[in-house]
Structures are given as structure tokens and as C-alpha cells.
Image (spheres, grey):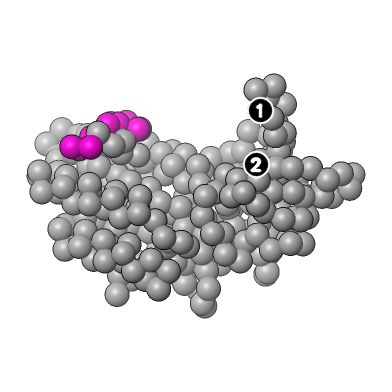
């Protein structure tokens, strides 16, 4: 997934009201307000003074002319904070057959209504002679210890609801797959942050018991693009 316009560097002043951030552009010292497309806690990724990367836009329909996309980390690593990016990355990878456990499906549809509550699944995969595969994507960018990526970074009742809906699809004879996409380059494995959301941890355990598949992949992140890289171990306990 390539960014639509070249990113520009800035220094973060503050993040506030969940979706807003103030920053100073490196190129001219101008202070601007940027959209921060992330409803989570963003622990360790929103500290004042951090070097961040913004995507400019000239869309007259948008009040804010910059969108926050990346954070620079120690050791030359990067983290992506835009929670809309994982669906685009995984969608491209699914259509290119790059996710091995799902590569046999020839048809990929996004945002399809499903289930008793008429929710929208991120991707519905279909293929001749195979059960339909319902694929949900989650953005992962929390790291607190060693090389562990963790999800979630705050309580997510919506995430637990998605797991229950995926379990219901398995009960109906379909495949249900949750893809955790790690949007940072300094992690080598993933686990559930049970201390931050015990309810989500319980929902994951129930979903695994029901037959929901859990996949985890890391990403290659540059100021030009974010792309799928390798499968990472997912540790559920």
C-alpha cells in the first residue's frame, strides 16, 4: 500500500481529543493540526517531541490538510498509527495470494454484510469447492516488553463482538479468520494484552475453542509504503 502523496517529517507537540494532533513541520517550522486516525490509547507512540511523518492533502472537502501516518522509533524502526492502513495492506495481499493459508481463494470481497446483526466483515473470500472464509483484520502497534507485539492497547468491546460473530460463522460451517497486522518493525512475535482487556482475552480463548483461526503478520514500513512481510508466531496463552 503506497501513500498517495509524499510524507513530510514533523515533531509531535501533542495528541488530543482522540483524533487530533498538533505538530511542528521540520521543513519550515510551521505549527499545524493533523488528523490522527486512531481511536486507541497509542501507548508509547504519542509522546511529545517524537519525530512523526504526515501525509499532506489538498482535498477541499477536508478541514485538516495533514494526516498522521508514521512514528519513528529507536534503532531506525517505524510504527504506523493509521488504523485504516491494515485493511488496505491485507486486501492487497489477499488479492495477490500472499497470505498462504488463504491463497487458494479466487474471489475477495470487502465490507460484506453478514451474521444475525448484519455487521460488515472486512473480507469475504469464496472459492470453488471451499467453505467461505470470513476474514477480520486488526491493527497492532503496541510494544511494551522485548520483541512482543500486543493487542489490544485499550478495552475493545467491539473487538470481542467481532470474535463472537466469527465464532458463529464457524458454527455454520464456514471458515473464520482473524488477521492481526503488526504495524511496527521492531517485533518478532505477538500475544494478547490480557492485563489491558481481560474481556478480550477471554473472547480470544473462546473463539479459538470454537475454531476461529488466528494469523499474525508483520509489515515493511517506509515513508513511501506499508506492505505485508512475514508471518509471526501468535501466542495465545
- Residue at (72%, 26%) from the top-left corner? 58
Q: Residues within 10 Å of mark 2 (few under 14, many from 20)?
A: many
Stretch in magenta: 105-117
- Left or right: 211 in relation to 145: left
Q: Nearer the viewer, residue 118 or 57?
A: 118
Q: Residues within 10 Å of mark 1 (few under 14, many from 20)?
A: few
- Residue farthest along the front direction in this orientation: 17
- Left or right: 128 in relation to 37: left
Residue tagged by mark 1?
62
Residue 92's image quarter?
Answer: top left
- Left or right: 153 in relation to 198: right
Residue 161 on image: x %, y %:
28, 50
What is the magenta segment's predominant secondary structure?
strand
SS of the residue under disc 2: strand
Image quadrant containing the C terminus: bottom left
- Residue farthest along the right direction in this orientation: 28
Asked if labels 1 and 2 touch by Cβ distance under 8 angstroms, the answer is yes
Residue 22 on image: x %, y %:
74, 49
- Residue farthest along the top direction in this orientation: 60
Residue tagged by mark 2?
35
Amino acid at each position: 500500500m503506497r501513500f498517495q502523496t509524499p510524507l513530510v517529517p514533523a515533531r509531535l507537540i501533542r495528541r488530543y481529543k482522540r483524533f487530533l494532533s498538533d505538530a511542528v513541520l521540520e521543513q519550515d517550522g510551521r505549527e499545524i493540526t493533523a488528523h490522527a486516525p486512531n481511536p486507541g490509547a497509542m501507548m508509547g507512540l504519542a509522546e511529545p517531541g517524537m519525530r512523526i511523518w504526515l501525509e499532506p492533502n489538498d482535498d477541499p472537502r477536508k478541514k485538516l490538510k495533514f494526516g498522521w501516518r508514521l512514528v519513528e522509533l529507536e534503532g531506525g524502526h517505524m510504527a504506523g498509527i493509521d488504523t485504516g492502513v491494515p485493511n488496505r495492506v491485507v486486501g492487497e495481499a489477499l488479492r495477490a495470494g500472499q497470505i498462504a493459508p488463504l491463497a487458494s481463494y479466487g474471489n475477495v470481497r470487502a465490507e460484506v454484510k453478514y451474521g444475525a446483526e448484519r455487521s460488515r466483515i472486512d473480507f469475504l473470500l469464496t472459492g470453488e469447492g471451499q467453505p467461505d472464509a470470513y476474514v477480520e483484520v486488526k491493527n497492532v502497534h503496541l510494544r511494551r516488553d522485548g520483541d512482543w507485539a500486543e493487542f489490544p492497547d485499550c478495552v475493545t468491546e467491539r473487538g470481542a463482538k467481532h470474535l463472537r460473530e466469527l465464532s458463529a460463522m464457524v458454527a455454520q460451517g464456514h471458515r473464520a479468520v482473524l488477521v492481526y497486522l503488526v504495524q511496527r518493525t521492531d517485533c518478532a512475535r505477538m500475544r494478547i494484552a490480557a492485563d489491558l482487556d481481560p474481556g478480550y482475552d477471554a473472547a480470544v480463548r473462546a473463539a479459538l475453542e470454537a475454531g476461529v483461526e488466528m494469523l499474525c503478520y508483520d509489515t515493511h514500513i517506509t515513508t513511501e509504503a506499508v506492505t505485508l512481510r512475514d508471518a509471526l508466531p501468535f501466542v495465545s496463552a
